[in-house]
Structures are given as structure tokens and as C-alpha cells.
């Protein structure tokens, strides 16, 4: 049984006060949501204050990005060590905004995935095709390449060492959501690729999340799919009520 994940990617949003208040609302509600793993990924400058709020509770903390070197002259970057020191268990790697806006390559994403593991962080490794890829029939090839290149040389010892997020670029922040069936098709593709890489047991245990315009009103259909193990939420994670409704929706999966 894969424990569902409700992860909030706050991206580059919120004031310090709003970040702390949102973290507190999620922290206070989380004990009432057993059976769902809740992860908050604030902007790096708010990690320490959010860590203080959620420490000693069930909510886990994640970074939004990391650099692959451990320390040194890398102005503006943040290492896996630093994310660990501040209390992170997870780190998003290869988010589509980093791939497409910041021009991160598969090779860089791969270095980051492996660096996360070296620093005992669980990567939330993101893949996703653009609308153009999908419309020109390249979805499968693009996802396969991102998975194979991004995870090259990564060696999970247990299924908890990696979380994958399928985030179709055309569904992020657009209000367009993949249908549950469209998403599940890609999740099955990804799980098949994981099986080829690491065998049945890890493929059966690794959680694959969906991301892209997830809202309280579409969560049920998504988590009802057999291979969708939770969600990575952007816009709707910035409002406690909406995010907690999504987390409650994820519980339907753990109860089924
Ligand atoms: P939205 O939920 O705002 O579409 O963002 C999804 C996302 O990119 C989460 O990482």
C-alpha cells in the first residue's frame, strides 16, 4: 500500500507572515488527516520559519531546488546539506519551471537527483511533456527520456527514497487538468520504466504524484486512479482551506 502524498509547492509566492500563517494552519490540521503524508515546499528564504512551525508534527518540509555541490563558491545556490540542516526531508528536482524557464537540462536534473540522495533528501523528481509534445505524438518519448536521463546512476535502496511527479507542462497554472485517465496512462508508463530500471518491488512501492491545476473539485477523480499516489499542488496550495481539502481528498485513496 502506497501512502498518498499531498505536497504543496508554494513556488515564488507569499510574504513571510503569510507563509508562517499558512504553515501553521496546515500544521494544526494535519493530525486530523492520518493516512496522508503532507509536504510543504516554501521558498528557500522561508524554510527556517516554516520549519519552526511544523517541527514535532506530521508535516514534512521540502526545498524547491538544490545545487549538486555540497559547499563553496556558488553564489545564489543552496546545497543539499543546507536543506537538511534547516529540516528538509524532501526536495523538488527538475520542476518544469526550472526546465523551461531556467533552462535546466536533463544532465543538470540528474546531478541534482543524485546530490539529493547523497544528502539524504528524498527527491520529488518531476517530469512532463509540453502541449506541443503531446499534440505531435511525442509524449511517450519525452517522458521516457526524462525518466531515463534524470534517474541515470540513481540507486534507491527503498521505495521511500524517491517520489516522482508527473506534471504535464500544459496543465501547470493554466486551469487545464489532465483527465484522470490521461494522467493515469502516463503514471503507468513511468511505473513501467521504473520496473525496467529497478524491478517489481521498487516499482510497486515508489509514489508517483500528479501535478497541474489540482483543485479540491478534481482531486477525487485523480486519486481514484490506480497509479496516482497523490498530488503536487501549486496555486491551490497557497490557501489553507483549498490545500487541506485536497489533502482530505487524498485520504479517499488510503481508505479504498
Ligand atoms: P498549479 O497547481 O498551479 O497548476 O501548479 C502545479 C505545479 O507546478 C506544482 O509543482
Image (spheres, rainbow, N blue to C red):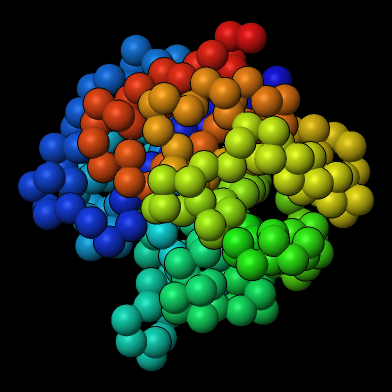
Query: In front here: 80 or 100?
Result: 100
Q: Where is residue 58 in the image (x, y as percent from the top left)?
A: 38, 27
Residue at left offset 56%, top offset 52% = 167
Quarter of the image for the C terminus: give it. Answer: top right
Residue at left offset 34%, top offset 16% = 31
Looking at the image, the residue that sits furthest to the left is 17
Q: Where is residue 56 in the image (x, y as percent from the top left)?
A: 31, 30
Q: In the rendered image, is residue 230 in sight?
A: yes
Looking at the image, the residue that sits furthest to the top is 255
Query: In front here: 256 or 172?
Result: 172
Would you say 137 lies left or right of 5 here? right
Q: Where is residue 233 in the image (x, y as percent from the top left)?
A: 42, 42
Residue at left offset 45%, top offset 78% = 102
Residue at left offset 91%, top offset 51% = 196
The answer to which quarter of the image holds residue 252 is: top right
> In the rendered picture of this protein, how many numbered marks are placed on residues?
0
Q: Is residue 244 above or below residue 161?
A: above
Quarter of the image for the N terminus: give it. Answer: top right
Would you say 228 lies left or right of 140 here? left
Query: In front here: 208 or 85?
Result: 208
Looking at the image, the residue that sits furthest to the bottom is 73
Q: In the rendered image, is residue 148 in sight?
A: no
Would you say 87 lies left or right of 128 here? left
Would you say 43 lies left or right of 227 here? left
Q: Where is residue 80 in the image (x, y as percent from the top left)?
A: 47, 65
Q: Is residue 180 above or below residue 130?
A: above
Amino acid at each position: 500500500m502506497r501512502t498518498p502524498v499531498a505536497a504543496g509547492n508554494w513556488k515564488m509566492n507569499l510574504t513571510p507572515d503569510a507563509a508562517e500563517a499558512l504553515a501553521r494552519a496546515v500544521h494544526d490540521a494535519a493530525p486530523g488527516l492520518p493516512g496522508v503524508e503532507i509536504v510543504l515546499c516554501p521558498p528557500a528564504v522561508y524554510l527556517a520559519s516554516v520549519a519552526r512551525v511544523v517541527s514535532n508534527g506530521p508535516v514534512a518540509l521540502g526545498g524547491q531546488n538544490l545545487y549538486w555541490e555540497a559547499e563553496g563558491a556558488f553564489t545564489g545556490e543552496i546545497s543539499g546539506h543546507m536543506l537538511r540542516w534547516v529540516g528538509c526531508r524532501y526536495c523538488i528536482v527538475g520542476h518544469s519551471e526550472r526546465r523551461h524557464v531556467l533552462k535546466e537540462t536533463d544532465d543538470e536534473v540528474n546531478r541534482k537527483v543524485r546530490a539529493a540522495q547523497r544528502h539524504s533528501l528524498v527527491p520529488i523528481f518531476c517530469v512532463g511533456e509540453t502541449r506541443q509534445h503531446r499534440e505531435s505524438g511525442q509524449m511517450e518519448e519525452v517522458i521516457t527520456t526524462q525518466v531515463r536521463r534524470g534517474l541515470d546512476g540513481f540507486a534507491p535502496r527503498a521505495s521511500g527514497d524517491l517520489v516522482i511527479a508527473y506534471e504535464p507542462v500544459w496543465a501547470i497554472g493554466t486551469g487545464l487538468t489532465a483527465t484522470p485517465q490521461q494522467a493515469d496512462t502516463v503514471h503507468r508508463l513511468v511505473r513501467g520504466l521504473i520496473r525496467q530500471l529497478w524491478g517489481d518491488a521498487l516499482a510497486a512501492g515508489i509514489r508517483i504524484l500528479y501535478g497541474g491545476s489540482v483543485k479540491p473539485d478534481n482531486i477525487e477523480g485523480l486519486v481514484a486512479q490506480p497509479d496516482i499516489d497523490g498530488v503536487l499542488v501549486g496555486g491551490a496550495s497557497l490557501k489553507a482551506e483549498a490545500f487541506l481539502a485536497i489533502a482530505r481528498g487524498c485520504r479517499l485513496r488510503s481508505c479504498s
